[in-house]
């Protein structure tokens, strides 16, 4: 309850901020886009990760406020990131995209389609440069409603990424019922890729499946060059992880582009 009250006042006091982590095209190792990740700059507790406040926000009805903030920030910074990219096209591979996490609770809210429509019309950003990222576990709550909301996002021109793929309950059924345009392999598989034969086979199988469905894959949690090399060899299109860059505030993210 204390946390709930603190989140509420934190939103009002501007304590939340978005950080951005680079996503690269593995074949060229050049920048393809960013994932926006929320952080809470708490006056006493310092930088608080999402795992410590998103679940509370979801259960207390505050998640909509946080998502509203995240979408507004994304709409605000996307033009800045594009401008940064223009200054150094050498390091960019294709039109930059920005990926933003939303909760299953957001997708179930009647106001969500309007939030997306407003974001597009008020900022003038190209819908194709924005991806909505959702985790499997949160889609479970109301799969039909989530499917409907995501279909709305697709109709508006946004991409839809399934996050943490392979760790949920019915991953495969989502691929047929949801309008998925990107699949993100959970970092649990990447972490064990080099040492565990089974994990390597699972990744290979996911990549074949995605290839069959013509859905590009992002491998998450890449920390070592050997992992990136192997994933490239295996045909994974995109990579994300500390090897390429940590989540960082906008100014630092733009430096990633200009390096
Ligand atoms: O940044 P970090 O590794 O701690 O993020 C962990 C998880 O928190 C992410 O994978 C994502 O599922 C969730 N998360 C991060 N930012 C946001 C956000 O802005 N909104 C929502 N709903 N979840 C987020
Ligand atoms: O839940 P989601 O996958 O959307 O969020 C990604 C989370 O993974 C973020 O919290 C981010 O800080 C974290 N992350 C990103 N790259 C790496 C990495 O290379 N290693 C580890 N351990 N965590 C990472
Ligand atoms: Mn994510
Ligand atoms: Na993930």
Image (cartoon, grey):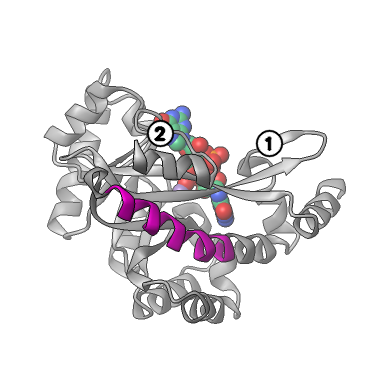
State which quadrant residue 147 falls in. Answer: bottom left
Q: What element carries label 2?
A: loop
Can residue 134 be seen in this snapshot? no
* Nearest the eye: 162 or 49: 49
Crowd class of label 1 (few under 14; some 14 to 19; many from 20; radius 10 Å): some
Q: Is mark 1 on a helix, strand or loop?
A: strand
Is 241 magenta? The answer is no
State which quadrant residue 8 falls in. Answer: bottom right
Which residue is under mark 2? 245
- Residue at horizontal 35%, vertical 74%? 154
Drawn side of residue 219 relative to residue 8, left or right:
left
Position of the C terminus by quadrant:
top left
- Residue at horizontal 42%, vertical 72%? 125
Return the x and y of residue 116 as percentages of the image width and height. 50, 75
Crowd class of label 2 (few under 14; some 14 to 19; many from 20; radius 10 Å): some
* Nearest the eye: 76 or 116: 76
């Amino acid at each position: 309850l204390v946390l709930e009250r603190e989140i509420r006042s934190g939103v009002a006091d501007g304590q939340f901020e978005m950080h951005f982590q680079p996503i690269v095209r593995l074949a060229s190792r050049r920048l393809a886009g960013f994932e926006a990740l929320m952080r809470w700059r708490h006056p006493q507790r310092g930088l608080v990760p999402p795992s410590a406040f998103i679940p509370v926000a979801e259960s207390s009805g505050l998640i909509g406020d946080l998502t509203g903030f995240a979408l507004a920030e994304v709409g605000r910074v996307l033009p800045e990131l594009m401008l940064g990219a223009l200054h150094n096209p050498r390091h960019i591979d294709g039109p930059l995209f920005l990926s933003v996490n939303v909760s299953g609770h957001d997708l179930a809210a009647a106001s969500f389609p309007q939030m997306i429509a407003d974001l597009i019309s008020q900022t003038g950003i190209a819908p194709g440069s924005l991806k909505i990222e959702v985790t499997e576990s949160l889609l479970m709550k109301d799969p039909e409603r989530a499917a409907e909301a995501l279909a709305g996002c697709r109709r508006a021109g946004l991409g839809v990424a399934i996050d943490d793929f392979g760790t949920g309950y019915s991953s495969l059924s989502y691929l047929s019922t949801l309008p998925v345009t990107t699949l993100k392999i959970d970092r649990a598989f990447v972490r064990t890729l080099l040492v565990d034969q089974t994990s390597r086979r699972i990744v290979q199988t996911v990549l074949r499946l995605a290839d069959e469905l013509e859905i590009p894959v992002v491998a998450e949690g890449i920390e070592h060059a050997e992992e990136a090399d192997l994933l490239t060899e295996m045909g994974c299109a995109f990579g994300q992880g500390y090897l390429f860059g940590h989540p960082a505030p906008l100014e630092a993210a733009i430096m990633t582009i200009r390096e």
